[in-house]
Amino acid sequence: MADTPAAPQAGAIDVAAVRALFPALHQQVNGAALAYLDNAATTQMPVAVLDAMRRFEEHDRANIHRGVHTLSQRATDAFDGARAALKRFVGAGREHELVFTSGTTEALNTVASGLWAGGPGHAWLREGDEIVVSGLEHHANLVPWQHAARRTGARLRILRPDAEGRVHEAGLQALLSPRTRVFAITACANATGERPPYEALLAMAHGAGALTVLDAAQAVGHAVPALSRLECDFMAFSGHKMYGPMGTGALVGRRAALERLYPLRLGGDMVEWVSFDDAGYAGLPARLEGGTPNVGGAVGLAAAARFIEQQGRAAIDAHVHQLRAHALAGLQSIAGVRVLAPHAQEAALVSFVADEVHPHDIGTLLDERGIAVRTGHHCAEPLLTQLVQGPTTRASFAIYNTHDEVDRLVAAVAHAVKALR
Ligand SMILES: Cc1ncc(COP(=O)(O)O)c(C=O)c1O
């Protein structure tokens, strides 16, 4: 095997202690200890998150904002407290607001459709405008923009990656024009691990007069963007990729930009007044949170942010980035295996292809050894079609993963490739 980085030193994450906090990790799968390496899809939850949600459901569960009774007030306080905690977590400032969503997909749809759904006179996007989207994106940050372009007559332009899967400032410069109204990019590509220079790209697009959108789904569990330091109007993330519950997430951004969005969920809780003929919509954040929210989920999401803070962001980042480097070195030592974006910094995943072997077959053989990875296009089909003309196998790391699990991964891939060729 090629040179690999040393195992984490004292003072870093105490992985054994951390693992004890995650009940789901302690099981056998197909006769072997589970090695859960599918964290870019969904992370497991620590007991602190499970307990916070259970406490809410057993003690404070009630609908928010509409009740004078004690439980309703406690639930409202819990919801508002979760919002405040998450705003702090992503570095939101006074000019920002956070809207709870069911995840990144809902957050990005809220932006992409909200920019035209107000109709003529209110829409930010109009015929002849241009929307620039990076070519590194998950479908959640591409398909809603395709739809917005179709509905408005705007033109969708793609910031194409190079053959190594990088996007460049010069490429964006060439695409920006006085017609550019939106620029959308990921903080970390889920299919390759590529970490684009999003700070500089967002600043360039902002300078050109565009609204800027950052998909932080793959960054929120490590290398969390600091919102106040970015020229970012909208940022989206999901709870289930940061040790929080599934079906939770947020859209956080500048109030002035959020106020441009026509709400997609019309009904209760998002209005100030209603007559038979008309309604006056509430201010932020209620305006974009129509209907009963997932209050227990918000409580769990805030507990997940607290868990990350308690463990130490820098320590988590160093740990997962080191696991990635260890996996990269091991996989690159296997003949015929190609890792995508090997240069990527701040990545917590490895995505790879093997000559003459289908990723689904690799994934199946890994599962037989208790190793959970993801195979396929990872909802980023255009990018993978450009880079490798097909699907990949992806292993992705979290705070509880170990060097030993990476060694098991590398050994199992070497065995699978040999057996399948
Ligand atoms: C970069 C990126 N964006 C968006 C999403 C969609 O997130 P969700 O399914 O939680 O809405 C994902 C999920 O894998 C992702 O990795």
Image (tube, rainbow, N blue to C red):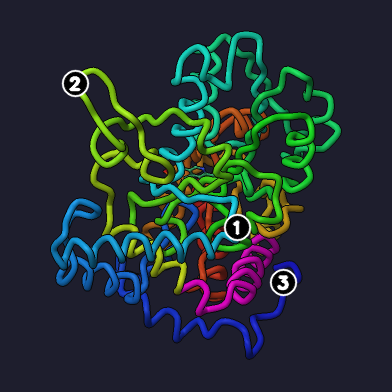
Comes first in the chain, label 1 or label 3:
3
Our reading of the magenta stretch's main secondary structure is helix
Q: Secondary structure at mark 2?
A: loop
Q: Amino acid at mark 2?
A: Phe
**Viewer-proximal residue among 8 and 339:** 8
Comes first in the chain, label 1 or label 2:
1
Q: Secondary structure at mark 1?
A: loop
> Measured from the top left, where is residue 155 in percent x and y?
64, 14
Q: Quadrant of residue 93?
A: bottom right
**On screen, 265 above or below 300?**
above
Q: Secondary structure at mark 3?
A: loop
Q: Identify residue for label 3.
A: 4
Q: Which mark is residue 93?
A: 1
Residue at 56%, 51% in the rendered image: 96
**Magenta span:** 307-329
**On screen, 89 above or below 162?**
below
Circle 2 packing at 10 Å, graded few (<14), some (14-19), many (20+), is few
Q: Which mark is residue 280?
A: none
Query: Was residue 212 drawn as part of the magenta stretch in this picture?
Result: no
Q: CA distance from mark 3 to mark 2?
A: 68 Å
> Measured from the top left, where is residue 211 in percent x and y?
65, 33
| The C terminus: image quadrant | top right
Q: CA distance from mark 1 to mark 3?
A: 40 Å
Residue 354 seen in the figure: no
> Measured from the top left, where is residue 326 in percent x and y?
66, 68
Q: Identify residue for label 2.
A: 276
Residue at 73%, 36% in the rendered image: 206
Q: CA distance from mark 1 to mark 2?
A: 38 Å
